[in-house]
Amino acid sequence: MRRALFDEYLPRIMQCRLEDLVIETPVQEMPALSERLGVRILVKREDLQPVFSFKLRGAYAKLKSLTPEERKRGVICASAGNHAQGVAMAARHLGIDALVVMPNITPEIKINAVRKLGASVLIEGDDFDASCVIALRLAEEQNRVFIHPYDDPQVITGQATIALELFRQNHRPIDYLFVCVGGGGLAAGMALVSKYLHPGIKVIGVEAGESASMQAAFAAGKPVTLPEIGHFAEGVAVKRTGDLTYHICSQLLDDIITVDNDEICAAVQDVYEDTRAIAEPAGVLAIAGLKKFFTERPGCEGIAAAVLSGANVNFARLRHIAERAAVGEEQEALLGVTIPEQPGSFLSFCETVGMRGITEFNYRIADRAEAHIFVGIALKKGVTEKHEIIAELRAHGFEVTDLSSNDMARLHIRHMVGGRARVEHEQILRFQFPERSGALLQFLRGMESDWNISLFHYRNYGSEYGRVLMGIQVPDEDSDRFTAFLRATGYHYTIEADNPAYDMFLGSN
């Protein structure tokens, strides 16, 4: 069976010429991640293509193969972005009219890019599969040639050229190759070349856990349609893998593994730290899978390569990605802690946490007996340190709930802690604390023991100063001492007594 696949595809792949539009992307080392995992890691920078994605290869290979009559008819495709940009650029280069159907989930950056490349865009369908149905109908109605994003021999041929470049650019044998899987076109093409040129190489497909259609096909022995999928990595959000790509991948892939959204976000951070590239979630699937694979197999050695497949990400998503990366990398613990509602308990809590970095702290007085605080703590030793912190807090009498894997807490509750409260003698202030360990502890130790903290919000924004909103109950007769204390801290502060946002959301009814 493998021989038949090689005989069918390899001559076509070897003869595929895309140089007049597609660039030969560099192979780059990831030294920091290599040191952490104990293997040499190479990344093929397909994010550097003119459309910031490998999809240009398959699209251009397909459009070049069209007959003159087919080119006159025009083309149509369905895509969540990267294939659309590839088709649009290839069509412009060849003088072909192009219509692209894009699902509602498509990031604006990808929609605008397709329009700038001269293609007509129709936004319709809740996901790729729905848009694909619409595109197929329009192809028949308008007599256009439908350009499938993955389940097409010419598209697979174009994607396979990445592997040809990779092996030509790297002179030492590659032991492991990790490839992202959406519909399977990239994995099928690269596996064909890899297994033919280097039969001993391990080729591993990586899918997003919430849209693992190839893994489901492997389990069923045939392509199946998933009832629902997630869209965080919208570039690989495919309900059903291709029939053709499954036929190839089922014979040539050594394994299929899945990664969750936190692992994807952590891989975005790893890529940035090693290459300074800002990748999209679907673009780092292979790196996320590589990390998971070698973390679970610490004795493995050799050279591992992965494809950085795309960089079309809306800038606004980076805040969310950064927050999730800390948890995915086990660099942050999120805890719900109950402490006594009395002066000094907050200081006791901070002394228990010690000099560890606090990434977030949310609290608003609500109950006269107990205080519930939401805290993020930076971790240097991963999950082991998290368990140590929890044990220390419980040993000091604090009730602790681990919220690190709680999606509601991570996505919503952390931003909603608070509410109105009737608090006597409350002073509301904004502070800038130096972003260093112990800054908060120093502040608390300088406070009068009978001044109660009634509100606290802090989030590490990665800047030189930590920004803190604090409520402190200070009797009128202590006003002068409190002012002297504030000045003695040396921290910049602003009194927010008349801020309308406080009256609206945090003050008494």
Image: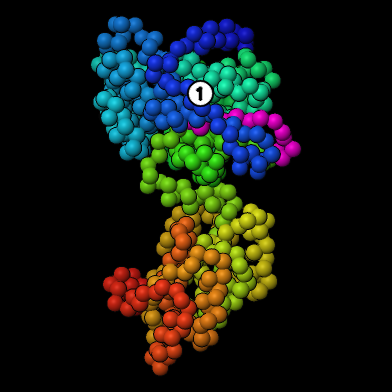
Q: Is residue 42 part of the magenta span, yes or no?
A: no
Q: Position of residue 87 (x, y in %)?
A: 35, 22
Q: Position of residue 69 (x, y in %)?
A: 29, 6
Q: Residue furthest right?
A: 299
Q: Quadrant of residue 310?
A: top left
Residue drawn at x 39%, y 16% as measured from the top left: 20
Residue drawn at x 51%, y 36% as measured from the top left: 284
Dot 1 surroundings within 10 Å: few (below 14), some, or many (20 or more)?
many
Please provide the residue range marked out in magenta. Answer: 297-309
Q: How is the image coloured?
A: rainbow
Q: Is residue 185 above or below residue 329?
A: above
Badge count? 1
Q: Quadrant of the image for the C terminus?
A: bottom left
Secondary structure of the residue carrying tag 1 is helix
Q: Is residue 249 left or right of residue 66?
A: right
Q: Residue furthest bottom?
A: 477
Q: Is residue 302 part of the magenta span, yes or no?
A: yes
Residue that carries the numbered disc 1 in the rendered image? 186
Residue drawn at x 32%, y 78% as measured from the top left: 497
Which amino acid lies under the numbered mark 1 shown in the image of this protein?
Leu
Q: Is residue 338 left or right of residue 500?
A: right
Q: Is residue 385 left or right of residue 509?
A: right
Q: Nearer the viewer, residue 14 or 149?
A: 14
| Residue 450, visible in the rendered structure | yes
Q: Position of residue 270 (x, y in %)?
A: 55, 43
Q: Is residue 231 above or below residue 188?
A: below
Q: Nearer the viewer, residue 217 or 394?
A: 394
Q: Nearer the viewer, residue 57 or 9?
A: 57
Q: Position of residue 478 (x, y in %)?
A: 43, 91
Residue drawn at x 50%, y 23% as measured from the top left: 186
Q: Quadrant of residue 10?
A: top right
